[in-house]
């Protein structure tokens, strides 16, 4: 079974993200640390059965040889809540649930990802994603799925 592990606020600078959370929630964030492999640092706040993380690139760390998590290398704008992260005690069981779903008869025919930096996103995905249904177009951030149904194609998003 999946459960929420934590929420992530991404920021260009850690102090800006911490200030956002502290102002919004009226508390002081305390703990945190550094992630050498990803060249990031964070601050944490316990929320009972889960936690809130503010995470940002660590300006004092050498740049990593891989993309940072949460697409942080391309993050722009003010700090904001960007992700929720799930946890499980049995990853294999969770993965197995996908193919076990009953076939609905519906089929994804196109997944359109609109992004203001479409060319850069296409280049980043070109070496990692090999699915002709995925199309990256220029535009405001959005995702649209075209799904074939018994009554014809339908668009979600």
Image (cartoon, helix red, strand yellow):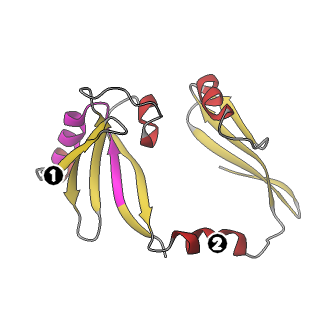
Q: Check residue 55 for magenta coloring.
A: no
Labelled disc at residue 31: 1
Q: Nearer the viewer, residue 57 or 115?
A: 57
**Residue drawn at (88%, 64%), measured in percent from left and top?**
150
Q: Check residue 9 for magenta coloring.
A: yes
Dot 1 falls on a residue whose secondary structure is loop
**Residue drawn at (65%, 29%), measured in percent from left and top?**
122
Placement of 8 over or under 49, stated as above or below = above
Which picture quadrant has residue 46?
A: bottom left
Q: Earlier in the sequence, mark 2 or mark 1?
A: 1
Residue 84 coordinates in the image, percent (x, y): 41, 56
Do tag 2 and tag 1 residues touch (Cβ < 8 Å)?
no
**Residue drawn at (19%, 48%), measured in percent from left and top?**
32
Left or right, 18 with respect to 150, comes to: left
Q: Identify the residue under disc 2.
A: 96
Magenta-highlighted residues: 6-22
Real-space Cα distance between discs 2 and 1?
A: 36 Å
**Residue drawn at (12%, 53%), measured in percent from left and top?**
27
How many discs mark residues in the rendered view?
2
Left or right, 20 with respect to 115, comes to: left
Residue 73 coordinates in the image, percent (x, y): 43, 30
Placement of 112 over or under 31, stated as above or below = above
Placement of 63 over or under 143, stated as above or below = above
Left or right, 121 with respect to 60, comes to: right
Residue 60 coordinates in the image, percent (x, y): 23, 26
Circle 1 packing at 10 Å, graded few (<14), some (14-19), many (20+), is few
Q: Nearer the viewer, residue 71 or 156?
A: 71
Q: Nearer the viewer, residue 76 or 68?
A: 68
Dot 2 falls on a residue whose secondary structure is helix
Circle 2 packing at 10 Å, graded few (<14), some (14-19), many (20+), is few
Residue 72 coordinates in the image, percent (x, y): 41, 35
């Amino acid at each position: 079974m999946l459960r929420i592990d934590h929420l992530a606020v991404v920021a260009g600078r850690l102090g800006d993200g911490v200030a956002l959370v502290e102002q919004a929630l009226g508390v002081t964030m305390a703990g945190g640390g550094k992630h050498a492999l990803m060249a990031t640092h964070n601050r944490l706040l316990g929320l009972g059965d889960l936690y809130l993380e503010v995470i940002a690139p660590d300006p004092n760390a050498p740049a990593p040889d891989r993309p940072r998590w949460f697409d942080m290398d391309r993050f722009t704008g003010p700090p904001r809540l960007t992700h929720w992260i799930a946890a499980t005690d049995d990853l294999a069981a969770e993965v197995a649930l996908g193919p076990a779903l009953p076939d609905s008869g519906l089929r994804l025919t196109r997944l359109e990802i609109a992004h203001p930096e479409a060319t850069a996103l296409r280049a980043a995905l070109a070496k990692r994603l090999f699915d002709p249904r995925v199309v990256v177009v220029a535009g405001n951030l959005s995702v649209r799925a075209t799904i074939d149904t018994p009554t014809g194609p339908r668009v979600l998003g």
